[in-house]
Each structure stands twice: as C-alpha cells, then as structure tokens.
Amino acid sequence: MARNFKYHVYFRQYNDEILQKWKGRVKLCLLGIDLGGTTIKAGLVDLEGQLLVKAQVPTGAGDGAAAVLGRIGALTDELCRRLGITRKDLKGIGIGVPGSVEGEKGLVRLAPNLFWRDFPLGEELSARLGLPVAVDNDAHVAALGEMWRGAGRGLQSLLMITVGTGIGSALIINGYVWRGFFGYGAEMGHVKMLPDGPLCHCGGRGCLETLASATAMVRRFREYLAAGRISRLQDAPGLGAREILAAAAGGDELCLQVVDEAASFLGRALANAALIVGPEAVIIGGGPVQAGEVFLAPVRSYLTEALGAWQIRPLPVVAAGLRNDAGIIGAARLALQLT
Ligand SMILES: [Zn+2]
C-alpha cells in the first residue's frame, strides 16, 4: 500500500508544485526509455510531455545485461548531444520493461525476453548514468503515457489493454498505476474466459490472450482452414493479424468470423473488468487497433451488450493515441515521480 500511496501523493502534487517549479526551464528534460526484447527506444521529453527527440538501437539482449546498459548509456549521450544538452540537464530517467518489476528501486523480477531474473535495473542504471531512475512494467508505462499525452488525456481512471502477441493491461485509478499487492494486479491477459480453452504459456487454459490476441486470431484462422473453411486470404508463413483484419474489412466471411470471436472475448472481459473498477474510459492499444473500426466496433458492441443495464453512461472505448511513442512518453512520466 505504501508504494501506491506514494504514487498517489506524487500525482496530486504534480500540477501544483513540480510543474510550477520547473516550468520555463526548457533545458531541463526527462529521459524516457522503452526497453523491448528487440529494440531500445528512447527519447527526451519536456516537463509537459512533449517528445523533443528520439532514437533507437537494437537491444542485443543475448549479449548480457552489461552490454544492454552500455547501449542505453550511449543512446542517452547521443540524444543529449542532439538536443545540445548534457546529462546534468536531465531531471531523471524512466524506463519500461517487458516483465514484472518490484519496488521503488526497480528490481526486475522476471523479464523472459531480456533473459533477466532478479536484476536490479534501477540501481545499476542509476549508478552507470549518475541519475535517478524509475522502473515499471511496459504496459503500466504505456498507460501512463496515454493518460499524460494520449487518448486518456485529462482522465484519472483508465483501463488500458494492449493487444499484440499477448495481451498486456494496466489500470490507473485516481491518477496512479494500480500494481496490485503481489505484483499481478490488472493482468487481464490471463483472466479465464473459456473452461478447457487453449493452453496458455502461463500454464492456464482459456486465458484471454489465448482467445483475443493477434496470435490467437492467426491460430483460429488456421484451425478453420484446416477444418475445410474457405477464405479469400491464403495461409502463408508470415501471415499475421494485420492481414486477417484487412481481409475482414474487405468482407471476407471467415476473417470476419475470426475477428468477431476475438472481439467477443475481449469485449466481455473488458465489461467484467469495468464492472469491478468502473473506469472513465477503456483504451485499446496494439497492432490490431490500427486496423480501426473493423476491430474496435465489435469490441465496443460486445462490451455494451455485456454491461447491459449497468452502462448508466456510455463507456468510451477508444484507440490508443500515442502508438509507438507511448512507451517513451509514459516512461518520462514515470520519471517525474523522482523529485
Ligand atoms: Zn495465461
């Protein structure tokens, strides 16, 4: 509770004290880092959330943690050089990682894509760069970005879900990220939607991400083809959800059915979550959302149906606004807590 309370106090103070203190000092910025399994994206962001400059390098996670930290250091100096500032002009660093993060010192408990287990990222990076560092899970960080500068601007309570290879999610209540007491709060990708459903990598069956992720859509499409169903879209090794959504938008019946099934699971899962937390809005990010209404419209429709009479006011379901920059801007927002 103490950790979340600190977030709460911080966000309350942000507008009043911190912004007043630093506003006008345009040289001072935040460094936001989106550390992915394949790419490190980083950017310098001003205190109002404006992305000033960004760059990216391959993560090279297989070279070990020290090499990854070295690349982050080089990227930091390159960004500063481009903006004509030095590390001393950075107020702090925020970093989002694809894994579970514990505590204010940024201990990465498990990040399979980076091959990290119990790695003290916050301490190590802070020692290397001589700056304060805040660390959080990448889905949480993206939601902070959307709240600050994206589709959730001006809102205080958000449910965000990111549909990709898996399904990531985050819950912001009264302006702060709800992490849960044991580190798995808002893990919507693993809510159980179908008894005896497909096996998930977490060991469970019928998890939402086995039914509504981009991966799930491709798997389902192939299952239907194998069962003799016909589609204008041909199977190919590189086939992805993008192609299925495009074919659905073009009227392909099988693809429409696959998208509709995924949307039905996602819409009902979101309705269940909304009935528990009552958010101001639901934000959906990830690749399939870029296909637009062909995906969002059925999600909205199933959500509305499942909420039924409880939807006293229409619950906005909107596409994420920051796309690829959400991780950088959200990480910078995270860094603002370092006072
Ligand atoms: Zn699972």
Image: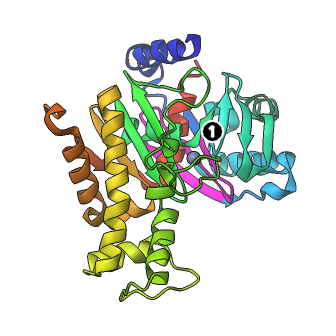
Q: Residue at x 28, y 37 (%)?
A: 281
Tell me the quarter of the picture where residue 30 sits.
top right
Q: Look at the image and give the residue range highlighted in magenta.
A: 32-56
The residue closer to the viewer here, 276 or 134, is 276
Figure disc tally: 1
Residue at disc 1, secondary structure:
strand
Task: Tell me the residue that label 1 is attached to.
Answer: 95
Using the rendered image of the protein, determine whether residue 35 is visible from the camera's viewpoint. Answer: yes
Q: Position of residue 67 (x, y in %)?
A: 84, 51
Other-residue count near label 1 (Cα within 10 Å), few / some / many at <14 / 14–19 / ≥20: many
Residue 159 to residue 235: above or below = above
Of the 4 image quadrants, the one containing the N terminus is top right
Residue 196 drawn in magenta: no
Magenta region, main secondary structure: strand
Up the image or down, 235 lies above or below 169; here it is below
Looking at numbered disc 1 in the image, what kind of residue is underneath it? Ile
Front residue (pair 43, 213) = 213
Whether the magenta-drawn stretch holds residue 41 is answered as yes
Q: Is residue 339 left or right of residue 322?
A: right
Name the one closer to the observer, 21 or 144.
Answer: 144
